[in-house]
Image (cartoon, grey):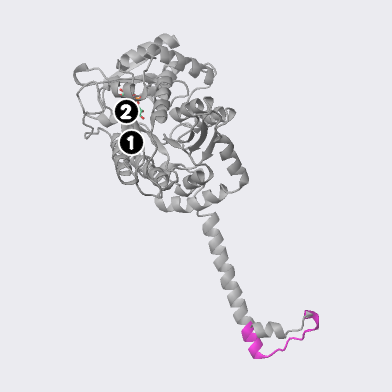
């Protein structure tokens, strides 16, 4: 072939093609090759551009193979100096004692408040969130806009995308990770168990893997849940109590997370702190939580289901206000010791902690409704019903003495005060009730 091209005159117009059967055969085989390669490339293009899932698809619906193909697309779109510039600017530390924190789930309820608080005191903050549609994504976008105004950039991506998370560590040597991205909600676990496994188990392990390989390794603070106490009846719940009787699949994934934390601390020297949040509420909250949709439905004049236990037993929660939780998160970050590993290997014993972050004063759900009625000046249509077998436990109550001692946690907002702030926010966000929450 090469010889043939070389022997052809350089000016094609003067070249006279010989019409021999041999030449016809060559033409045939060249055409066949051309057709083959064209088809091959067409098939490749088809698979890359039409078969790959859209980068905005939610974490809850993805299976492993589609995640893998999405990974390559995602990462390539995050290449480039502009992306890196935004990440670096967001991570810039502005105080002498500042830390640099990767906040996963930054467009979530707790994530937004923690990111804003860190930024306010001069820490470097980079957010990561997949903006899935478990609840109204426009609320997540509004929180993102809020953070953007204070200089926090949220990278749009999934915690299972290890290539992307490693890339973030290549750009910024984060000292801390505040891991808040999760599939939340107790009752939804019966509808979509896969999304809990995907985010709370696979996603957590993905984050731990990247952190273990990072150099230097960051200290990790992450969101566990009061639900790990499950069927425990000893009150108030103490960190020493048993947590091996989860009442929901959600609780089981959070409990599994605590066990993974133990393993990564033991093998790789990662510094890990799990925070057991107790029914966190407040402005910019989650619309899937009872206080939020009770408010929406009371305003709409719709009836609200209030659960009660057997024999008219009270169902109660240790509702905890968001500002108190934020202080607990910052306290945990500030007292977190460095991880001890490097190059994926443990070099010494590392810190492993778990704390209750509750309010220490449980309130019956019916009292919560009473407070909302007064604040909204609307009588609720109460539909009292037996607690369904949906994973909900009858009560929660935190003992917070360990958190008080170790991280200076001291909640100071009662439910009445906290709900007043929530209702004020709700009414202004939804334009005094004109634009109803979804
Ligand atoms: O403490 C925690 O760790 C958990 O707190 C909340 O879970 P939950 O306490 O069940 O909060 P809500 O869903 O807001 O329910 C609050 C109370 O209202 C009750 N409820 C809920 C829904 C309903 O229709 N009626 C009703 O009476 C529940 O049984 C519960 O006692 C969050 O949704 C979880 O993500 C979090 O992990």
Q: Position of residue 225 (x, y in %)?
A: 32, 30
The quadrant of the picture showing ligand 1 is: top left
Q: Give the tally of numbered discs.
A: 2
Viewer-closest of 181 and 250: 181
Separation of disc 2 and disc 1 at Cα? Answer: 13 Å
Q: Is residue 332 one of those drawn in magenta? A: no
Q: Which residue lies furthest to the right in this view?
A: 14
Q: Is residue 21 one of those drawn in magenta? A: yes
Q: What element carries label 2?
A: strand
Residue under label 2, please give it.
Answer: 355
Q: What element carries label 1?
A: loop
Prevalent SS, magenta region = helix
Task: Please identify the quarter of the rendering in which residue 302 is found.
Answer: top left
Residue under label 1, please give it.
Answer: 351
Q: Compared with residue 373, is residue 327 higher up or lower down, i.e. above or below?
A: below
Quarter of the N terminus within the rendering: bottom right
Q: Compared with residue 27, is residue 361 higher up or lower down, i.e. above or below?
A: above
Viewer-closest of 349 and 115: 349
Residue 45 visible in the picture? yes
Q: Position of residue 404 (x, y in %)?
A: 33, 21
Point out the stretch of residues depicted in magenta.
12-26
Residue 430 visible in the picture? no
């Amino acid at each position: 072939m090469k010889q043939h091209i070389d022997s052809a005159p350089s000016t094609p117009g003067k070249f006279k093609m010989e019409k021999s059967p041999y030449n016809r055969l060559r033409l045939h085989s060249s055409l066949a090759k051309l057709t083959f390669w064209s088809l091959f490339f067409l098939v490749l293009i088809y698979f890359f551009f039409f078969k790959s899932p859209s980068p905005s698809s939610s974490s809850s619906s993805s299976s492993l193979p589609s995640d893998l193909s999405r990974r390559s697309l995602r990462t390539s779109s995050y290449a480039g100096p502009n992306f890196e510039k935004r990440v670096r600017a967001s991570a810039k530390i502005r105080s002498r004692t500042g830390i640099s924190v990767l906040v996963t789930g930054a467009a979530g309820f707790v994530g937004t408040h923690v990111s804003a608080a860190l930024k306010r005191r001069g820490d470097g903050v980079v957010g990561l969130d997949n903006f899935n549609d478990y609840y109204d994504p426009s609320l997540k976008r509004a929180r993102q806009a809020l953070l953007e105004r204070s200089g926090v950039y949220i990278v749009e991506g999934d915690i299972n995308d290890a290539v992307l998370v490693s890339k973030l560590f290549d750009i910024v040597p984060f000292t801390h990770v505040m891991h808040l991205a999760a599939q939340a909600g107790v009752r939804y676990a019966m509808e979509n168990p896969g999304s809990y496994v995907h985010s709370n188990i696979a996603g957590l392990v993905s984050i731990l893997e990247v952190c273990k390989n990072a150099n230097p390794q960051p200290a990790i603070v992450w969101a566990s849940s009061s639900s790990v106490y499950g069927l425990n009846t000893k009150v108030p719940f103490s960190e020493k109590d048993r947590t091996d009787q989860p009442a929901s699949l959600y609780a089981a994934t959070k409990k599994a997370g605590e066990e993974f934390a133990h393993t990564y601390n033991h093998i790789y020297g990662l510094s890990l702190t799990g925070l057991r949040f107790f029914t966190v509420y407040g402005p910019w909250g989650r619309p899937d939580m009872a206080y939020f949709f009770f408010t929406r439905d009371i305003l709409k004049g719709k009836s609200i289901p209030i659960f009660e236990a057997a024999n008219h037993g009270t169902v109660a929660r240790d509702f905890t206000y968001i500002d108190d939780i934020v202080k607990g998160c910052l306290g945990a970050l500030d007292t977190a010791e460095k991880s001890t590993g490097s190059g994926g290997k443990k070099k010494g014993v590392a810190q492993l902690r778990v704390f209750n972050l509750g309010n220490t004063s449980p309130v019956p759900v019916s009292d919560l409704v009473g407070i909302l009625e007064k604040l909204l000046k609307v009588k609720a249509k109460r539909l009292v019903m037996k607690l369904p077998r949906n994973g909900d436990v009858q009560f929660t109550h935190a003992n917070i003495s360990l958190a008080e001692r170790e991280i200076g946690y001291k909640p100071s907002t009662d439910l009445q005060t906290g709900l007043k702030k929530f209702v004020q926010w709700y009414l202004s966000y939804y334009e005094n009730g004109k634009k109803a929450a979804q």
